[in-house]
Every structure is written in structure tokens, then in C-alpha cells.
Image (cartoon, grey):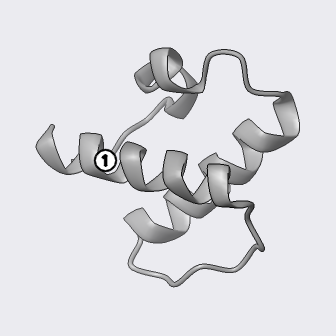
Amino acid sequence: MKIENFEEAFKGIIAGLDYLTIKKLEYEFRRWENGLGPKLKLSENEILTLNYIKDKAKKC
């Protein structure tokens, strides 16, 4: 399932994050969604958040 609006779909998860972090997570999520590997260096918290978002997307 392709997610059209990342921020709308995961607004509860990304609430409180700064703009740059949200865009980094969206970029890595789109790469994952298209079958590409990771590209950016993410902090531990960003990696955990991204993995949680991926799990939520798999369940949709």
C-alpha cells in the first residue's frame, strides 16, 4: 500500500518532531517503500521512530 501523505498518515507518531527530522524520516521511508536501502545517517531515536513507522505501514 502506497502512502500518499506521510505527515497526515503518521501525524500521531511524528508530533513534536522538528521539520528537518520529519523530512529525513519521510525521505528514508520513501526509499524503504520503493525497495531502496538507507542513505542518510540517522540518530538512534530517528532509527527507532522510522522502524516504528515501517511496522505501522506494514500493518495497513
Secondary structure under badge 1?
Answer: loop
State the residue lying farthest toward the bottom. 37
Numbered label tally = 1
The reply, left or right, for residue 38 in relation to residue 34 is: right
In terms of depth relative to the viewer, which is nearer, 35 or 53?
53
Quarter of the rendering containing residue 53:
top left
Amino acid type indicated by mark 1 = Lys
Quarter of the rendering containing residue 59:
top left
State the residue lying farthest toward the left. 59
Residue 57 appears at what percent x and percent y? 27, 44
In the rendered view, tell whether residue 48 sits above or below residue 3: below
In terms of depth relative to the viewer, which is nearer, 2 or 56?
56
In the rendered view, tell whether residue 32 sits above or below residue 20: below
The reply, left or right, for residue 36 in relation to residue 1 is: right
Q: Which residue is mark 1?
A: 2
State the residue lying farthest toward the front. 44
The reply, left or right, for residue 3 in relation to residue 47 is: left
Give me the residue at 41% from left, 24% from top.
9
Give me the residue at 60% from left, 62% from top.
28
Residue 29 appears at what percent x and percent y? 51, 56
